[in-house]
Amino acid sequence: MPSNIFVQQARVVTAQAKVRPSTIKQELALFDANGNPLSIVAATTTVRGTVKQAAVNADVATADGSDPATTQALANQLKISFNSLQAKLRTAGVLA
């Protein structure tokens, strides 16, 4: 290997303090408590990946408030949408 090329090394330490060296080449190796490699999968609403994906939350389609009645309707719709989003994030494990 030429002397001007540096191969970066990393040590991944598990909760049980097992040390396992790895070479980083634009990827990161992760290991479980037993030293077995972990694979990171794409997140969905049923499979945990890097994060668990939350279900889709519909956009607010209520017109902008231009008088007390439409302003109240918009405020009500925003509250419903916000509460729905919070519930979906809790289900996904993002919020407690």
Image: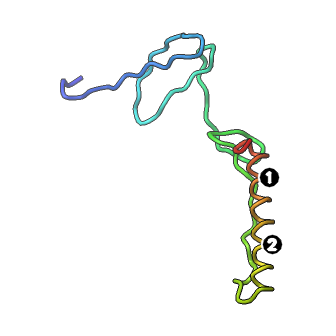
Residue drawn at (62%, 20%) of the image = 32
Query: Which quadrant holds residue 25?
Result: top left
Quick one: quadrant of the N terminus? top left
Q: Which residue is mark 1?
A: 87
The label nearer to you, 1 versus 2, is: 2
Say the numbered circle drawn on residue 48: none
Disc 2 crowd, CA 10 A, few/some/many (<14, 14-19, 20+): few
Residue drawn at (61%, 26%) of the image = 38
User: Which one is nearer the viewer's eye here, 78 or 25?
Assistant: 78
Query: What percent of the width, then of the height, locates residue 73?
Result: 80, 79
Say the numbered circle drawn on residue 76: 2
User: Which residue ends up furthest to the left in the rendered image?
Assistant: 3
Asked if the residues shown at circle 1 and circle 2 are in contact, with their CB atoms under 8 angstroms apart, the answer is no
Residue drawn at (78%, 43%) of the image = 46
User: Which one is nearer the viewer's eye here, 21 or 80?
Assistant: 80
Query: What percent of the width, then of the height, locates residue 34?
Result: 63, 13
Q: Earlier in the sequence, mark 1 or mark 2?
A: 2
Query: What percent of the width, then of the height, locates residue 67?
Result: 74, 89
Q: How many marks?
A: 2
Quick one: quadrant of the C terminus? top right
Q: State the separation of the CA atoms marked 1 and 2.
A: 17 Å
Q: Is residue 15 left or right of residue 4?
A: right
For badge 2, the amino acid type reads Asn
Q: Is residue 35 above or below residue 70?
A: above
For badge 1, the amino acid type reads Ala
Disc 1 crowd, CA 10 A, few/some/many (<14, 14-19, 20+): some
Query: What percent of the width, then of the height, locates residue 10?
Result: 41, 22
Query: Which quadrant holds residue 69?
Result: bottom right
Q: Is residue 38 above or below residue 70?
A: above
